[in-house]
Structure formats: C-alpha cells, structure tokens
Image (cartoon, rainbow, N blue to C red):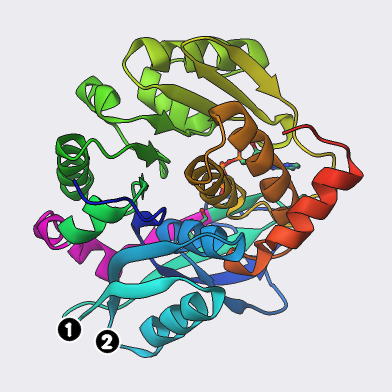
Amino acid sequence: MKEKNGAILVLGSLNVDVVTRVAHIPGPGETLLCQDYRFVPGGKGANQAAAIARLGGRVWLAGSVGRDFFGEFLKENLRQAGVDTRLVQEEKTATTGLALIMVDRQGENSIVVVGGANRKVGPHRVEGLLPYLRKASFLLLQLEIPLETVFQALLFARRLSLPVILDPGPARDLPQSIFPLISFILPNESETEKLLRVKITGIKSARQAARRLVQLGVKCAVVKLGAKGCVLASQGQTVHLPALSVKAVDTTAAGDVFAGAFALALAEGRESLSAAKFATVAAGLSVTRAGAQTSIPTRREVEALIRRKKIKL
Ligand code: ATP
Ligand code: RIB
C-alpha cells in the first residue's frame, strides 16, 4: 500500500446559497417582504472542504457543478480557500446546485436545496477517485449526492481500509447495514431521529442514541445538539461537550464547520474527543458570522479562542 499523505478526500455537493434574512420563517401561504439577498458559496461537501482548508489542512473536493457562472464562482472561492478542486467536474447537462435559505432573527434557518449538478455525481465517479482514496487519510461524506454513490464510496473505502466520516445530512432513510462501513458518524438531532426512529429531547436521549449508533457498528458517534453542544460515544466513553456560549447570528453550516474541523483534527492525529472539542470551538465561532463558507474561522482564530478560554483539547 502507498504511503498516506495526510490529505482528506471530501466527496459531496457544491451549492450557491441564495440567502435572505426574514423576521420569521413563513408558514404555508404566507408572503414576507424582505430587504435583500446575497449569493454565498455553500453546499455541504464544499463547506466541509473549505473548513478543512481554512483550518490549515490538505483537502481534495470531488463533486460536480454546471457549466455556468455559479460553477465558476464556487470553484474560484474554494481555490481561494485552499481547496484542491481538480476533482470538481463540470456537467454540460445540469446547472450548478442551489440552496434557497431564509435566516430568522434568532439565526435559525430554513433551507430548500435544488440538487442540479450534484445529482449527476453517480457511482461511476468513485472508481476515478481510486488514486486519491489510496493516498487520503480520511474520506468525508454527506448525503447531498446520490445515495448509491455514497454506498459505492463506502465499499471502496472498506476495501482500502480507509476510515470514513459521514455527516448524514440532509436527513435521509438509511439501511442499518451502512453503520459497520462508517468509522465516525456526525448526525444532528433530526438526522439522529430519522436514522434510529427515536425522539431526541435533550442530552439524555442523545447519549442513548449515540451509544446505540456504536452498538450498530460505527466506531464513534457524535450527536450534534446545536446550542446544547454535542454528545460523543465510542467503545469506551459517552461524553457531553457543551457548545461555546455565543450570540448566534446565523447557524447555517455550523454542522459543516464541525465536520471539517473534526476530520482535520483526526487527520492531525487527535483522538475523537479532542477532535470534537476542536470542532466545537470552530463551529461555535462560525455561528457568530453570516453565511456558509463566509462564516468559517481561520486556524489562528480557533487557536486564539482555545487559549483564551483555557480549553484543554
Ligand atoms: P447545520 O446548521 O450546518 O445543518 P447541524 O444541524 O448539522 O448544523 P448543529 O447541531 O446545529 O449541527 O451544530 C453543530 C455544532 O455547532 C454544535 O454541536 C455546536 O458545537 C455548534 N453550534 C450550533 N449552534 C450553536 C449555537 N447557537 N451556539 C454555539 N454553538 C453552536
Ligand atoms: O449545511 C449548510 C448547507 O446546506 C448550505 O450551504 C446549503 O447549500 C445546504 O446544502
């Protein structure tokens, strides 16, 4: 087997986010008048790759955009963040993925994702990633590309003994046979409910759910609880980590920053608990800023806050 080069391979989505701020999330049939909107680089795969790069890691992003202005805009932003985009393909027959995002006064959001070119990332793409899968230290996946592709990538990673981190968002039904193929799983509350068909009502039920995911075959489960932090379970421990106490401006992509920072910290050799502490600081900083990739902190900012708060990683 070839020597690993420490880089992380992210296989996932790229979206342009069309973001508007609203007084409240509208109900059915309701019309709201808003001031303006912004185009922000987003998409779960791209956000996670950008987080790894901005925090100082080496990362390849594999995915698809359309042959259009937004595709160029997203790739250029990623390159500026330090992401290697050579595996981002241009699709002739699809437009770049798009997310319509409303953010309310509490920083909570409501999102509609139009898959576009992300839907073209079929299982046939995985074989072409083999040279990168061989060199990568981790594979990071989410669920905004076809599920068959996610499964194909999991099978290739298993054959290569490459550890996989799965952020199972957006929430989708998954067969339980998937869990033994995953080393680290990072669901939020609603994704956990969908995966296990349980209700998450607080830290106690999150602890039970995280332990259940480990029983089902993952090595480590981190159930993310927004402002309540997260619960991490692995073979030896179940630990609750409180979130940073911050004023939330926009929680969009907090989970993506968490996933990117967690993957990077693991790739740098940290244990899962230490990686989750690092990720909690990075994600906490991101909710104080607007947008998806625009909210990702730098390594220097994360380390400064860790020092200031005297957090022991
Ligand atoms: P996303 O909004 O990207 O879909 P998610 O739903 O996957 O995120 P969350 O549980 O909302 O994930 O957030 C991930 C992590 O971000 C949390 O575990 C926490 O550390 C941090 N975080 C989220 N919201 C807040 C908040 N209001 N204050 C402080 N930290 C937060
Ligand atoms: O997780 C946040 C992301 O979800 C946004 O950037 C949006 O593109 C959707 O994919």
In the foreground, 63 or 262:
262
Q: Position of residue 197 (x, y in %)?
A: 39, 17
In contact (CB < 8 Å): disc 2 and disc 1: yes
For this orientation, the residue located farthest to the bottom is 69
Residue 224 or residue 268, whichever sits in front: 268
Q: In the rendered image, which quarter contains the C terminus?
A: top right
Q: Amino acid at mark 2?
A: Arg
Q: Tell me which residue sits at (53%, 64%) in the image.
A: 53
Where is ligand 1, by quadrant? Answer: top right
Residue 157, percent from left and from top: 22, 41
Q: Which residues are magenta?
A: 111-128
Above or below, 195 against 166 in this view is above
Q: Residue at x 54, y 27 (%)?
A: 223
Any part of residue 170 in sight: yes
Q: Is residue 119 above or below residue 71?
A: above
* Label 1: which secondary element: loop
Which residue lies under the disc numbered 1?
92
Q: Residues within 10 Å of mark 1 (few under 14, many from 20)?
A: few
Residue 174 shown in magenta: no
- Amino acid type for the residue under numbered disc 1: Lys
Mark identifier at residue 67: 2
Q: Indicate the quadrant where residue 91 lies.
A: bottom left
